[in-house]
Amino acid sequence: MLFSSRVRALALVGLFSAGAAQAQALDAATRAATEKAALAALQQHYVLPDRLADLPQRLNAQRARLEAATDAPAYARALGQLLAELTNDRHVNVAYSAEPLPAVVAATASSPEEERRRHRFVNQGVTKVERLPGNLGYLDLRVFSEKGDAAPKLAAAMTLLADTEALIIDLRHNGGGRPETVAYLSSFFFKDRTHLNDMVWRTPRGEERDSFFTEPVALHYDKPVWLLISPRSFSAAEGFAYNLQQLKRVQIAGQPSGGGAHPGGMHRLGAHFSLFVPSGRSVNPKTGTNWEGVGVQPDVLLPPADDALRVVQLRLLEAQKAQIQDPRLLRGLEARLQELQAAAPKS
C-alpha cells in the first residue's frame, strides 16, 4: 500500500522524469554530487538500513554502468536502476527534471495537480464496470486514487454489481495508489469492522505506525470475489490483494505481482535530480510481514499466455451449473461455457 494517513502522503506510483527529456551532458562533479546526495538520503530515510551495508563500495563497483549513461535522463535511469538493484527494492527510483527543482520537492515525481488531472482522465482508475454472461460482475480498476475522488466512482460500481452472483476485480494493470482508498473498497466485502494492515515508518523519533481498518459503507457484498493480478500489479494493488487473501475473503488468479510493499517520498538530490526513498513498510496483522520482493502469490497460478479472466469465468460458471434448476438458465450457461472453452489459447 502506498500512502500514510499523516503528513507523509508519499506516492509510489507514476514515477517518471519530470519536464522534457532533453539531452544534457553531465560533468564528473555533478555525477559525484548526485550520488553522494542519493547515498545520504538513503542512509537517513530508507526503511531497512541493514540493506545499505557497504552501499558506496557496491555502487562504485558498478561505475561502468553509470559512465555509459552520457546524458542526464539516461543517467537518472541508470542510477535509479542500480540503486534499486543494490537495495533489492523496486520502489527506489531516480527522476530527472529538465527544469530546476524547487528547494523542497513534492512527495511524488508529478505534482498533486498533475496527479489529480491524470486520475480524472482515467476516471479514478475505474476503467470498466460490466455484467458478464452468467450474471458475473467485472470491475477493471487501474489505480487507487485519492479517496475523496475515487469513493463515488467505486460506490457506483459496487451498486451496479451488487446483485451479481460473483465478482471479478481486475488488478492486472493497477500500479498502486492510496491505502485509504484500498481500505474503502475493502469495506464492501466485510460486514464487521476489520483490521486490514499497518504501515510502519522510519522517522527521526523511531518507528511510527498507521493502522488501516474497513469502514461502514452502503452495501455489503457477500458473494464470491476473485482478483486477477500480474507482475504489473504493484504496491497498493498488491496490498489490496494480500490483505483480502490473508483474510480468506478472495481467491486470486494470474501471476505473482510486482513485489513492492515499501512506501516513501521524493528527496531532492540537486537542481535536476530527485530520489524516491522508501521510508515505510506494510505489516499484515495476520502474517506479521508483507509481499516485498516476492509479490502476492496467486491461488491459481496461470502461464503468461493464458487469460485469467476467461479461466476465472469458467470456474465460477462451472460452480453455478451445479446449482441451477431452471432449464433456460442452464442452456444459456452451457452455451457460455462452450464459448469460453473454445477461446482457450492454442498450444
Image (cartoon, grey):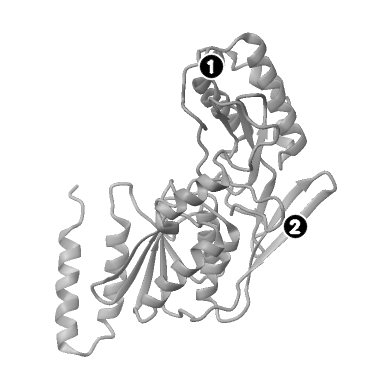
Look at 20% across and 51% down and name the residue there. 345
- Which is more toward the observer, 345 or 102? 102
Q: Amino acid at mark 2?
A: Arg
Residue annotated with mark 2:
209
Look at 57% across and 24% down and name the residue there. 79
Residue 80 appearing in the image: yes
- Which is more toward the observer, 92 or 150? 150
Q: Quadrant of residue 95?
A: top right
Q: Quadrant of residue 277?
A: top right
3D distance between C-alphas at marks 1 and 2: 38 Å
Q: Confirm or deny contact between disc 1 and disc 2 (CB under 8 A).
A: no
> Would you call the spot at circle 1 few (<14 residues within 10 Å), some (14-19), or many (20 or more)?
some
Q: Position of residue 185 (x, y in %)?
A: 51, 68
Q: Position of residue 135 (x, y in %)?
A: 28, 77
Residue annotated with mark 1:
65
Above or below, 110 relative to 61:
below
**First-in-chain label (1 vs 2):** 1
> Would you call the spot at circle 2 few (<14 residues within 10 Å), some (14-19), or many (20 or more)?
some
- Dot 1: what SS? helix
Residue 161 appearing in the image: no
Left or right, 336 with respect to 7, comes to left
Look at 40% across and 52% down and name the residue there. 121
Above or below, 247 relative to 35:
below
Q: Mark on residue 135?
A: none
Q: Quadrant of residue 100?
A: top right
Which residue is farthest top? Answer: 28
- Which is more toward the observer, 112 or 16? 112
Q: Position of residue 176 (x, y in %)?
A: 51, 51
Look at 20% across and 64% down and name the residue there. 340
Q: Amino acid at mark 1?
A: Arg
- Dot 2: what SS? strand
Q: Which quadrant of the rendered structure holds the N terminus? A: bottom right
